[in-house]
Amino acid sequence: MPRYALKVEYHGAPFSGWQRQSEHPSVQGAIEAALGRLERRAHTIAAAGRTDAGVHATVQVAHCDMDKDWDPFRLSEALNFHLKPEPVAITACARVADDFHARFSATWRQYLFRLVMRRAPLTHDKGLAWQVPHPLDVAAMQAGADRLIGRHDFTTFRSSICQASSPLRTLDRLDVEAVTGLSGPEIRFHVKARAFLHNQVRSFVGTLERVGAGAWTPDDVTAALEARSRAACGPVCPPHGLYLAGVGYDPDPFDHN
């Protein structure tokens, strides 16, 4: 069965998350239903990461196995036709080796979190960014973020229902960037690692917001990390500002497509 890698973009608001659920809409379920319209059988796809309810993606990667030898462009076009009107798009498709796996072949994942600082309600960015009504000190937030770089026990910053076998992870990047966004002053968090724990990025951002507001210091971030206790974590920010923004492979299956 020919295997294809799919680069997927989606707006997470209507979905209960990536993972298929019997009673709730999911991104996986939407794509598998579209595949079923192309080849009438049950389809099961795998993804690089299982995003939670309300989380978006600019670059998610999944793979599927087909009966027919599809031209990758025609497969992506056919899927996009059958995905309408769901806010899901296949932005690239590539034929890959039979041993390619969207999750297990990935060498890194990158997330973006968007935070908008303004008092007036969001209109254009409603549901796409976390709104905070007060100004934040970006330099202090970066100083706090720097305390989290490297390999650590991230028990403090993982959900109590996280199913990972170990809290040890290596954080490669956590950059805090101030930009002028569509809705006003915006802070963007760029986070990169080989793999993440459940709610890890949202726990980072919620904690760093407290640093930016002056309620915490960078030393408090270090103390929270070293506590290895969920109770030491700052507030967990809402999901709608979070985007899966990149997945790395070697070689990249989409390089020549």
Image (cartoon, rainbow, N blue to C red):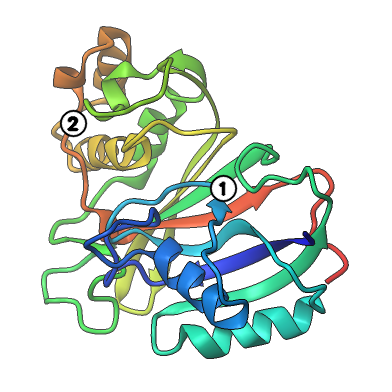
Give how far apart the Cα atoms at labels 2 and 1 are.
Answer: 27 Å
User: Toward the viewer: 234 or 39?
Assistant: 39
Dot 2: element: loop
Disc number for residue 48: 1
Residue 114 visible in the picture: no
For the N terminus, give its image quadrant: bottom right
Residue 255 visible in the picture: yes
Dot 1: element: loop
The answer to which image quadrant residue 235 occupies is top left
Name the residue located 35 percent from the left edge and 46 percent from the top edge.
138
Q: Which residue is mark 2?
A: 234
How many other residues sit within 10 Å of disc 2, few (<14), some (14-19) or many (≥20)?
Answer: many
Tag count in the figure?
2
Rendered view: 14 above or below 55: below
Q: Is residue 37 left or right of residue 128?
A: right
Rendered view: 92 above or below 136: below
Sequence-earlier tag: 2 or 1: 1
Residue 213 position in % (x across, y down): 18, 43
* Extreme-front residue of the structure: 41
Q: Indicate the amino acid at tag 1.
A: Ala
User: Toward the viewer: 216 or 168?
Assistant: 168
* Extreme-right residue of the structure: 256
The answer to which image quadrant residue 154 occupies is top left
Instruction: Find out whether the residues at labels 2 and 1 contact each other: C-beta distance under 8 Å.
Output: no
Name the residue located 31 percent from the left edge and 9 percent from the top edge.
226
Name the residue located 73 percent from the left edge and 68 percent from the top edge.
67
How many other residues sit within 10 Å of disc 1, few (<14), some (14-19) or many (≥20)?
Answer: many
Residue 2 position in % (x across, y down): 79, 61
